[in-house]
Amino acid sequence: MSPLDTAEENLAKDIRELASKIEKDAKEADVQEKFVVPLFKKLGYVEEDFTREASAGLRKTGEADIILKGKGNICVEVKDNDVSLESEKIMEQLEEYSMDKEYNPELTVLMNSKEILLFDASNSDLDLPFRFRIIKRFNFSEPVAVKELGEFLSKESNDNGTLSRGLAEYRKHREVILEKAAQTNEVAESRKQMREVEIEKVNKEWRGFNDEIKAIKTKAAAARARMENLQEGMDKEFEEAQEAIQAELDKAGFFDASSRKLDAKTKELLRIYKRSKKN
């Protein structure tokens, strides 16, 4: 095993021992002094690198638990072990600290003895959903990737520029993602406008169909009314013809057309009468 492997194994062992000594429901003060400070000292920081309860924020209205001084300053916020680290209120607090102009932190760290969340402090000037997203998470209930932890948080990594280079690479990748997102949004907006035009076209056609249907219904109603009027007139004429035939027959005093000689008008009325009976 190489010296580097041995150092990483020793660090992993130290982290497990530190975490095992902290109560599951430990409060912030205990977590900070019994776990966070010893952890960063294991990562190479000395007491002079710690600024505790530092007035921080764009308006200096809050107090960051720890500012770790180095080539790139690190803002560390510590919470109780039974607190959800990703609550909206805590995220707002971290964003405020990240915008501090005095310390100008390069990295923001949120942690208890259960896990560490790392944020690129430069994300605070971005619009949602890219603002203040977690760039790395270490869970102490699982085997810790100590090499990667050291690349982000060790004093050596901070002083030799490894942290800055890593964050610069992350920001470069982030810019690519933002550019792709912008292009995707542009395409989506264009497609949305095209769909809206097509929808309006279909709606216009539908409104036209409805107008045509209304016109057809109006014409059909008028035709029906004319048919009913014609039928009513025909019925009336038929009734009048029947009444005239009956009157003529009554006047002649018989109903059997074969027994008497009829005049031409009576014969015609009789013919109409017989035809109406067949119908």
Image (spheres, rainbow, N blue to C red):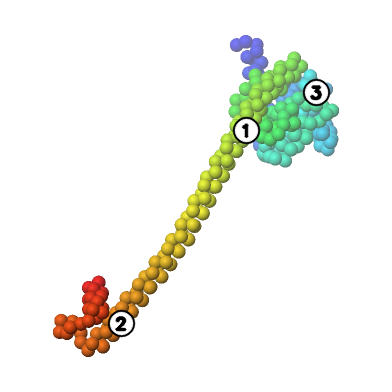
According to the picture, the residue beneath numbered tag 1 turns out to be 185
Asked if the residue under mark 1 is in contact with the one under mark 3, i.e. CB atoms within 8 Å, the reply is no
Q: What is the number of the mark on residue 102?
A: none
x%, y% of residue 89? 72, 40
Decide: marks 2, 1 in contact (CB < 8 A)? no
On the rendered structure, is 134 left or right of 277?
right
Q: In terms of secondary structure, where does tag 3 sit?
A: loop
Q: Which residue is mark 2?
A: 243
Label 2 sits on what residue type?
Glu
Judging from the image, what secondary structure is the residue with disc 2 in? helix
Give the number of the disc on residue 69.
Answer: 3
Residue 51 horizontal side relative to residue 209, left or right: right
Q: Earlier in the sequence, mark 3 or mark 1?
A: 3
Which residue is found at the position 17% from the left and 83% from the top?
261
Q: Position of residue 14 (x, y in %)?
A: 67, 23
* Pointer 1 local density, CA inside 10 Å: few below 14, some 14–19, many at least 20: few
